[in-house]
Image (cartoon, grey):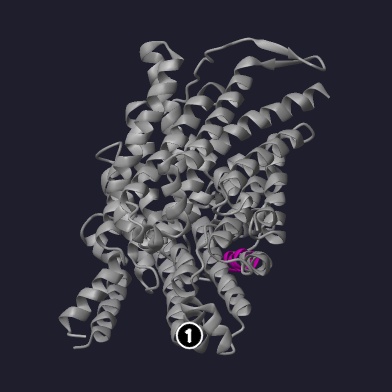
Amino acid sequence: MAEITTLALNGLAWGLIVALIALGLSVIFGLLDVINVAHGDFFMVGTVLAWVAVDATGSFAVALVLVPILGLLLGALTERIAIRPVLSTIVLTVVSTHGLGILMQEGVRATFGATPRRLVAPVGGTITLPGDVQYDVYRLVAAGAAALALLAFFAFQQRTRFGTWMRAVRHDRETATTLGIPVARVQLLTFSIGAGLALLGGVIAAPITTVDFRAGIEILPTCFMAVVVGGLGNLPGTAAAAVLLAVTEGVVSAFLDPSAARIVSLCLMCAVLFLRPHGLFAGARA
Amino acid sequence: MSALAVNRGLTALLLALLMVAPWLLAWMESEFWLTVLTEILIWGLFAASANLLFGQVGLLSFGQALYFGFGMYGVAIGIDRFGLGLWPAMGLGVAAAIVMAACAGVVAVRLTWHYFAIITVVFSLIFYFLALRLKPITGGDDGLSFAAPAIMDLGGLRLSLTDDATQYWFVLLIVALAFAVQARLRSSALGRAFAAVREGERKAALLGIDVLRVRWIAFVIAGGLAGLAGALFALYGRYASATHMYYTVSGEAVVWTVLGGAGTLLGPPIGAALLILVREELSGIWEHYPLIVGALTIAVVVFAPKGIAGGWNALLARVTGR
């Protein structure tokens, strides 16, 4: 029983981090119609920059503040160079972001190196939870941080003028233009924020995963699945689906080995896509 | 001269050059490029399977590596486990890919766009993880290696893949035939039905086209093409492994297709040739050559959104005044 609790909690923590990353993907997709296949690599760059920042300053807090800001800048830069020129056609965005992903992977391999590294958690030790479960403190902190960031994002979107613009452009780009909303600027900042969320996810995840230039390729399908299962354009749905997928996989891995658990969760995905092609939460929204 | 005549002439010239390439390269003393050319032909055929779905029917698949993998394992298992000859093993590989595509297609073609893209990825990931797990059948992480049987063995005449030139001509023959079939398909009634479905499924349905059936047929043909490419690749490397079933391999097919020119017959192999030649040319000079590949990929879609073949056709239309 204790083992299942641990694995379910692992799933929850990981799911909340994936939710953060997938949210970035979903925002970019919903607002710009861009299928960003480099999104996993933005996450990977986040883990690498976190490692570098901690290595240089010895402080995880510096990484936590600095890396997402770098992410915003990186996002803005790439939007201008690789996204804006191809915005008219969705399949071109796939190829363009694929090129971007190669640049980021190889850029990291050329500078940081190809050897996977580990980042020591800023808070170590375990805590005893009810039911006599020993659990890593950092994982709980990571889950809390990711949840907080999710809430902050939703508050930003609901409460600020820029957030309202984002929702308006996502809903109807032409009308938004007519109303005088600076659509191009909203698109730029949206891509920026999406990338920033991925890098933030990278910082939070760095101590519980390996820092490796290939990490983006591995996480990308999971993020896309969360976006699709949650319902395209449904941001809370994306977050919920990410958590649900990760917890399911965590619990299943108590009974089967990890790769079998992955197969089970993929089969569940198929069932969801087939039975509820517009996402798990489509009914709740309509 | 019309644009069509120019393109036909160029295609004939290309085919002639490809046919004499082994002698040409031997004369230039750069036989190494013959194996590169063989690989380009195989990956060009693989890219054509993504192009058939996206360029002709409008379905963006990120799962073609699944059928490539079935073709690959079909050949490897056929030769290694069942002791089949080369042709029966290829038949087994292609048949396995077609059967898999026929089953997966029933589910996949009901979805479109992003949903179609994601379900094709999901299918291919399921079988990727299965291939890693089912070690007794697939060899798991290590893959399966085997000794390729002869292409034909008629008493005195024995053709074998161990000779690079023979292997090249064997691959060229099959790839050229596959492209000839695709060219015929484009001008057939089915090819026009594909285009009708791509341009608007509602209109196509009003014209009496059974949209789901047409999509399913395209899906199965594309699976067969990918399977054939996988079968050739297994013979070329005498090896099959799950790495070539991962979703990134499917992504390459889409990238090659778009870079070369989606919807055109020869765009996908042109795109594959571009990136593979860049890789072979640069990988020996600079370890971090993928930086150039990434930048080139972005540059092509930014400056030639219709791909190389699409850009060429537009240029040709301007010159010939059409």
Q: Give left or right: position of B13 versus A251.
A: left
Task: Classify mark 1: helix, strand or loop.
Answer: helix
Residue found at x 57% / y 57%: B72
Residue found at x 36% / y 48%: A186
Residue A67 in magenta? no
Quadrant hosting residue A106: top left
Quadrant hosting residue B267: bottom left
Which residue is at the front of the view, B43 or A219?
A219
Magenta segment boundaries in residue numbering: B86-96
Which residue is at the front of the view, B55 or A223?
A223
Looking at the picture, how far across and down is residue A10, in whole percent? 67, 27
Residue found at x 27% / y 80%: B7
Looking at the picture, how far across and down is residue B131, in whole percent? 65, 48
Please identify the quadrant where the N terminus of chain B is shown: bottom left
* Disc 1 crowd, CA 10 A, few/some/many (<14, 14-19, 20+): some
Q: Main secondary structure of the magenta part?
A: helix
User: Is residue A109 at least partly visible in the picture?
Assistant: no
Residue found at x 17% / y 85%: B321
Query: Label 1 is placed on what type of residue?
Result: Arg
- Residue annotated with mark 1: B192
Q: Is residue A6 above or below residue A83?
A: above
User: Is residue A153 at least partly visible in the picture?
Assistant: yes
